[in-house]
Image (spheres, rainbow, N blue to C red):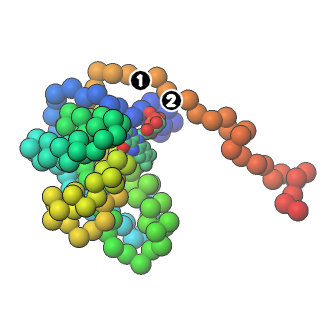
Amino acid sequence: MQIQEAIEKRRSIRHYVDKKIKEEDIARILKAGTLAPSAHNKQPWFIHVVENQKTKEQIADILMQKEDESIKNTARIMKEASVLFIIFEEKTDLSVKMQHQSIGAFMENMCLEATELGIGSLWIGHILEVEKEIKELFHEKRKVACALALGYTEVNPSPRPRKNLKDMIQIHDDEEEVE
Ligand SMILES: Cc1cc2nc3c(=O)[nH]c(=O)nc-3n(C[C@H](O)[C@H](O)[C@H](O)COP(=O)(O)O)c2cc1C
């Protein structure tokens, strides 16, 4: 698959079938993440790879405690996924913005590699709503960054709408310089 195709095909997948992802594919997805750029090459991420169903359910149960229906839906998805990556922030001397941009690059590389392998993915921010409980569950001192759900799917969601490019850019060409 060409990179353009993976970029266009990637979707947030919220329904997974009961089929295990091969260890070698999990390794390929992680490897793609590690090849992402990061500020000063600090690679400020640490990942708990959760394949164990009981642990997935413990994470989902924590999220289920929240009133918000969209958080409960994310919990259901996490339980259904074949594998969950819980991404923590490795402590560095990077600024918060540099740290988070680096983790964003790491995440997107993994989503694209999963697409290439025919595996669905969901980037999960809702895990931040239960950071304290997740740190306790994993006996972690590191901060929670986000999570990634991975699994095979039978759904094929249509692309979500995107803003028009013209509404988000300002071109500074030879005729239009910054005053
Ligand atoms: C930082 C970040 C956090 C997100 N958190 C969640 C989440 O907790 N639950 C969820 O269902 N989707 C989550 N998403 C997925 C977005 O809703 C999705 O990317 C967006 O609606 C565009 O759809 P698409 O990914 O299919 O193009 C998150 C995406 C990002 C980048």
Q: Residue furthest right?
A: 175
Disc number placed over residue 160 in the picture, else none: 2
| Disc 1: which residue | 157
| Neighbour tally class for label 1: few under 14, some 14-19, many 20 plus, Cα within 10 Å | few
Question: Taking 27 as reference, is 120 above or below it?
Answer: above
Front residue of 142 and 46: 142
**Measuring 33% from the left and 73% from the top, which residue is drawn there?**
91
| Neighbour tally class for label 2: few under 14, some 14-19, many 20 plus, Cα within 10 Å | few
Kindly tell me whether mark 2's CB lies below 8 Å from ligand 1. yes
- Residue 140 in picture, x, y percent from top left: 20, 66
* Picture quadrant of ligand 1: top left
Q: What is the secondary structure assignment of the residue under circle 1? A: loop
Mark 2 vs 1: CB contact within 8 A: yes
Front residue of 71 and 49: 71
Q: Is residue 54 left or right of residue 152?
A: left
Front residue of 2 and 71: 71
Work out which quarter of the rendered image holds the C terminus and state it: bottom right
Is residue 33 shown to the viewer in this render?
no
**Measuring 33% from the left and 52% from the top, which residue is drawn there?**
129
Question: Taking 179 as reference, is 147 above or below it?
Answer: above
- Residue 63 in picture, x, y percent from top left: 25, 45
Kindly tell me whether mark 1's CB lies below 8 Å from ligand 1. yes
Q: Amino acid at mark 2?
A: Arg
Mark pair 2, 1: CA separation: 8 Å
Q: Residue furthest front?
A: 67
Q: Is residue 85 left or right of residue 107?
A: left
Residue 37: image quadrant is bottom left
Q: Amino acid at mark 1?
A: Pro
Work out which quarter of the rendered image holds the N terminus and state it: top left
**Measuring 35% from the left and 36% from the top, which residue is drawn there?**
70
Front residue of 33 and 77: 77
Total residue callouts: 2
